[in-house]
Image (spheres, rainbow, N blue to C red):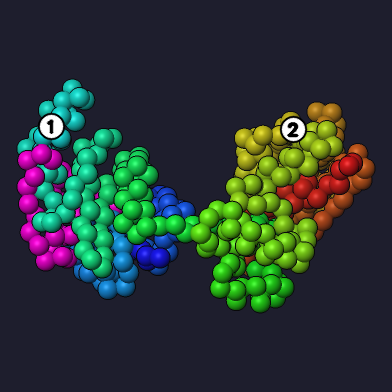
Amino acid sequence: MPSAEIITIGTELLLGEIVDTNTRFLAKCLRDAGIELYRTTTVGDNIKRIAQAIQQTLERCDLVITTGGLGPTVDDPTRDAVALALGVKSEFHPELWEQIRARFQRLGRTPTENNRRQAYIPEGAKAFENPVGTAPIFIVENPSSVVISLPGVPSEMEYLMLHTVIPFLRQRYELQAVIKTRVLHTVGVGESQIDDLISELEELSNPTVGLAAHSGQVDVRITAKAETDVLADLMIVPVEDTLRSRLRDWVYGTDQETLEEVSMRSLLLNNWSLTVVEAGLGGNLVRRLAISKGPFLAGQVLTGQPGAEELLKLTDSYRQSYSADVGLGVALHPNPGTQKVLLALITPRETQQYDRLYGGPPEYTSFWTFNQSLDLIRRIPHDT
């Protein structure tokens, strides 16, 4: 199985002007193709630093994929950087220039002289036409390594990765294996507690088990390598069963499921509607529920910091004004070092009040509170 690294190129990435979404897409494509990704790197628009990054990467792995720096301007240095890294010259390809001119013509435009730069690729490289953009991509093959350069525009990169690069990699490496991942989402339990419960599973070699902590939520990832999707699934199932038996009702969903979806589903199973009042969260809880698909009727953002009994009364009054079945009240009381959250949940069956403390980074308080609030709704029992 080949090993790979990704190099994203662009000073705008290092300056934080744009968010790198390319790495995530490429990583998933490589995973699904059964290629192990060892590392990702971001480099600014500097020929020597890009060349150095490529050379260092080739010492560690079989495959290097770069994104960005294939445009027509002076600060698009990837072509020359790859040539420098491999010790060859950049050479002009008339057929690429004709492809570029034809692309512009179809768009009703005329290429400028600097677009000719896009017809240069490293000596010995194989070019592939870009049907969704102006910059051709190229692949440099050696017996022990491959360098693939893709454009940085996400829509172009994604199309070329799926339609050109993945078929090339499958043929080059005779790929048969797949890598599949299953993610269990948990809420209401800390990372250290989960680790204590499943530590020996985290030592497995295939499938592997790993943790990813977020504010108020911990993801448990199962990754299996196998010859087919079916075999990978068969490897994942017993590990997932063991995790579920140990983590019990802390697990609220899998893969793309969100806590909003799961909590709204809990209400739908009871055929109940919901109203929310919140204080101290800047309307974040109401806004997020407003765009969710579920029986959320309305939300009110309170001023001040109501105490437990006042929050309960306000929650019930607002619920009754909309004839809702369930009322949720949330009030954040900021304190130095520790944030205090009051919660009130009123259902046709019972009324509950909670007092929770949060000692994490202040900037994550809102998200943590959001998860705590929806976890109350998720846990509402329903008739079976």
Q: Secondary structure at mark 1?
A: helix
Q: Which residues are magenta?
A: 67-96
Residue type at numbered disc 2? Pro
Residue under the point 65% across and 56% down:
185
Side (left or right) of 46 relative to 236: left
In space, the residues marked 2 and 1 are separated at their CA atoms by 54 Å
Q: In the picture, residue 356 is in which quadrant?
A: bottom right
Q: Residues within 10 Å of mark 2 (few under 14, many from 20)?
A: some
Residue 234 rendering spot, x and y as whole percentages: 64, 59
Was residue 71 drawn as part of the magenta stretch in this picture?
yes
Residue under the point 90% across and 47% down:
351
- Mark sitting earlier along the chain (2/1): 1
Was residue 55 drawn as part of the magenta stretch in this picture?
no
The C terminus appears in which quarter of the rendering? top right
Name the one closer to the observer, 264 or 316.
264
Residue 1 rendering spot, x and y as whole percentages: 40, 65
Residue type at numbered disc 1? Arg
Residue under the point 74% across and 51% down:
375
| Residue picked out by circle 2 | 295
